[in-house]
Image (cartoon, rainbow, N blue to C red):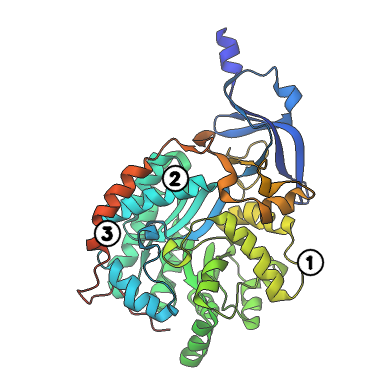
Amino acid sequence: MSPSRTEAAADLIITPCTVLVHDDQERIGFREDAAIVVRDGLVASVTSAADAVGLAAVDRLDARGQVALPGLVNCHTHAPMVALRGLAEDLPTEEWFNDVVWPVESNLTEKDVELGARLACAEMIRAGVTCFADHYFSMDTVAAVVAECGIRAHLGEAYFSSQGPQGRENSVEFALRHRGAAGGRITTALAPHAPYTVTDADLAATARLALEHGLPVHLHAAENRDQTDTSLARHGVTPIEVLDRAGLLATDLLIAHGTGITERDLSVLEGASGRVAVATAPRGYLKFGWPDTTPIRALRAIGIPVGLATDGAASNNSLDVWESMALTSLVQKSTEGDPRWLTSRQALHHATLQSARAVGLGDSIGSIAPGRRADIILVDLTGPHTQPVHDLAATLVHSARSADVRTTIVDGRVLMRDRELLTLDVPAVVRELGDRLPSLVDRGHGRRIQEYDT
């Protein structure tokens, strides 16, 4: 091959496949018998399979019978908490935190966080998640895992006011240190835990720091209706109004959960001068028996993007955004009493463009189009549970499973090919984590890192 031919070769061509595309009105559609050409980590073009036949490429993926989707985004999780999967079951929120999770988290070492992050990244890559927003401790360690394994991440070092000023300072230093790391795959945020664990003064200081440094903020707020009712009883304002009073609605803000968002909060959110988004993780709400879910219809009506999430595996048991997509559609239908809402195409929009916007990456990921980062997953629909296909969107949302993801690509790099993970050694991680579990889950010391009292 001549040098000029080598220079002209694409890094990767995926063909033939059906590609999920967005039109100029952001409506979901599908282009059949297509090919995706990738150069320098970007989608160079989406063309016909016939036109791709003569194109030179360093690597080609045979995607016959598969659908190419933008990689899924897990808009709120605590990746290292996979180490606590199944440890605190069938408990109300207060007991879940105070009796199990926060005592166990007082045992965490950097090694535990590293192993948990490795296992979580493996689980997400296998489930077609190409980007996750993480809110946890020892985040330098998580950033190192992300850099090594090739996934994309939006990371924040969590802090409580009980840590004193050092907690907030650590969060800022982490965000500045890692912003743009891993070749741009890592973006960062300030990460106060929640209005019930961070004082109004610290929330206001966080808002000032976010604006000063051009950093977004990621926190929990109005997680459930009990938190909202308690805030009203104690302070006369809702958690969302607390955020507004602190100046956080003037920042780029990602609110986790928001099932306690009330009617009076909607006008406050609509008037926000910053880019505000909400992440919904319905499986956890069902497990905790919360009476409400994220009011997606009302939020969309005022222009607030709602991204899909899993929360941590300690509450959700899974980091499967595929499941979150199906549950979001079903729970919204039930909550609204309307089978026409949320449709499969609407669910796919939340899973793609809206999730990308929620983590501040709406201009670079979330769709397969020229100039977008090549974060792509290939989904095999040849299995008996996905046949026949009368409505491709419905098949993807309600019939396909995360195990149908055959290949996962981030920035044009193949991280999983035909279900084989290429950047992580899961058996080694599981063995080492298993050796550490007895000391990690010990609660005999009686300590906890925080008190849950909303």
The residue lying at 44 percent from left, 80 percent from top is 92
Residue 239 rendering spot, x and y as whole percentages: 51, 79
The front one of 206 and 334 is 334
Residue 110 rendering spot, x and y as whole percentages: 27, 55
Could you tell me if residue 211 is visible in this image? no
Q: Earlier in the sequence, mark 2 or mark 3?
A: 2
Residue highlighted by disc 1: 340
In the rendered view of the protein, which quadrant contains the C terminus? Answer: bottom left
Q: Quadrant of residue 79?
A: bottom left
User: What is the CA distance from the residue labelled 3 to the residue labelled 1?
Assistant: 46 Å
Instruction: Mark 2 vs mark 3: give the one in front.
Output: 3
Helix or strand or loop: what does disc 2 sit on? loop
Residue highlighted by disc 2: 180
Task: Give the class, few, some or many, for how many residues have Cα within 10 Å of label 1's Cα (few <14, many ≥20).
Answer: few
User: What is the CA distance from the residue labelled 2 to the residue labelled 3?
Assistant: 33 Å
Of the residues shown, which amino acid type is indicated by label 3?
Leu
In the rendered view of the protein, which quadrant contains the N terminus? Answer: top right
Q: Tell which residue pokes out farthest to the front in this image.
A: 384
The residue lying at 64 percent from left, 51 percent from top is 352
Of the residues shown, which amino acid type is indicated by label 1?
Arg
The residue lying at 57 percent from left, 7 percent from top is 2
Residue highlighted by disc 3: 437
Of the residues shown, which amino acid type is indicated by label 2?
Gly
Q: Earlier in the sequence, mark 2 or mark 1?
A: 2
